Structure formats: C-alpha cells, structure tokens
Image (cartoon, rainbow, N blue to C red):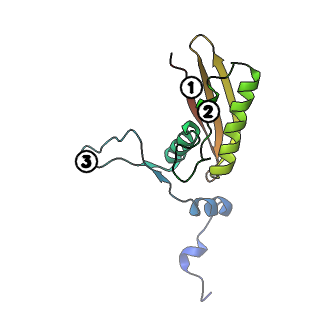
Amino acid sequence: MAGIIQSDKSITGDVAKARIVSRKKPHRDLDLSLKTHPIRKDIIPLKDDNAIKNALRNLLVSNFYDRPFSRDKGANLKGLLFEPADVFTKISLKRNIESVVKKYEPRVALREIIVNDDPDSNSYNINVNFKIKENDTAESVTIVLRRLK
C-alpha cells in the first residue's frame, strides 16, 4: 500500500466512463462572426462541441482552391449548384461531403446526410447528422446552398 495514494482507493462507479472523461481534449475555434466580449473587447472563441461544429461547417462550405497550400481541402458544394437538380447531383453532394469529412475531420463520425432540393428557390437544403467521437454526442449541421440570379 506504499505506492497507492488515498484518493486512488476511493474511486467508485464506472471506471471506464472516468477514463473517457479524463482523455477529453479541449477544442477551440475562431468564430467567424467575430463577436466581441463586452468587457474584454476580445473575440469570443468557440469551445468544444461548438468548435467542432464550426470547423465542420467551414470545411463543407469551402471550395477547392479556397485555402492556400491546401487546394483539395473543401467539399466543393458550390461547384455542384449549377448542375441539373436531379438524383445524380444529390449523390455527388453526398459523396463530396462524405469524402471531405472522412479525410479532414477525424473527430466526428457521420451518421446521416440528408439532401433536399428546392427548385422554386434554386437551392439545396443539406443536413449533416454526425456523432462527436470523444464524448459520443449527436450533433447536426444545416447548410443552405442557394443560386443567386
């Protein structure tokens, strides 16, 4: 008992959950709306789940060649806006989303991608449902792709 600290003996409950919580890393991201803190006058960063959702949204709305030195980083969804609104375009949108998330966002696991076209407003409503791997929470990101006339 010489090497055991008193606080180590008092662990009760589900030890597996305690290990998962202890490995959780804090995630931070810059909020692109650039909201400032009222007292500090600093930009308020996004934390944890909101940071992951924001990173995923930024990745999905990015096109190829938008980011310097990362030409293929992005889903290139806007490139598919001027294709015919049919099943093949929906499949291409889903495949682009799947490939970019699998390649560049290892913190999430995709659950479902729902693509609905709205021909009256020349837009696509995309809902990406995913699970954050670290804390096993379900989240979703909604994007509206719209053609401007």
Badge 1 vs badge 2, beta-carbon distance below 8 Å: yes
Seen in the image, is 58 located left or right of residue 134?
A: left
Seen in the image, is 63 located left or right of residue 94?
A: left
**How would you rate the neighbour count of disc 1 (Cα within 10 Å): few for under 14, some for 14-19, many for 20 or more?**
some
Q: Which residue is mark 1?
A: 145
Find the distance from the CA under tag 1 to the CA under tag 2: 8 Å
**How would you rate the neighbour count of disc 2 (Cα within 10 Å): few for under 14, some for 14-19, many for 20 or more?**
some
- Residue 138 x, y percent position in the rendering: 63, 40
Task: Name the quadrant containing residue 83.
Answer: top right
Identity of the residue drawn at 57% across and 30% down: 142
Above or below, comparing residue 13 to residue 104 in the picture = below
Pick the front one: 7 or 51: 51
- Residue 120 x, y percent position in the rendering: 59, 10
Badge 1 vs badge 3, beta-carbon distance below 8 Å: no
Find the distance from the CA under tag 3 to the CA under tag 2: 35 Å
- Inspect the image, locate mark 1, and give the three-letter code of the amino acid beneath it: Leu
**How would you rate the neighbour count of disc 3 (Cα within 10 Å): few for under 14, some for 14-19, many for 20 or more?**
few
- Name the outermost residue toward the left: 39
Q: Which residue is mark 2?
A: 77
Task: Using the image, tell me which numbered label, if any, was put on residue 108.
Answer: none
Task: Name the quadrant containing residue 92.
Answer: top right
Task: Give the mark, 1 or 2, whose residue is nearer the N terminus.
Answer: 2
Pick the front one: 66 or 57: 66
Identity of the residue drawn at 42% across and 48% down: 30
Q: Which residue is mark 3?
A: 41
Identity of the residue drawn at 66% across and 21% down: 116
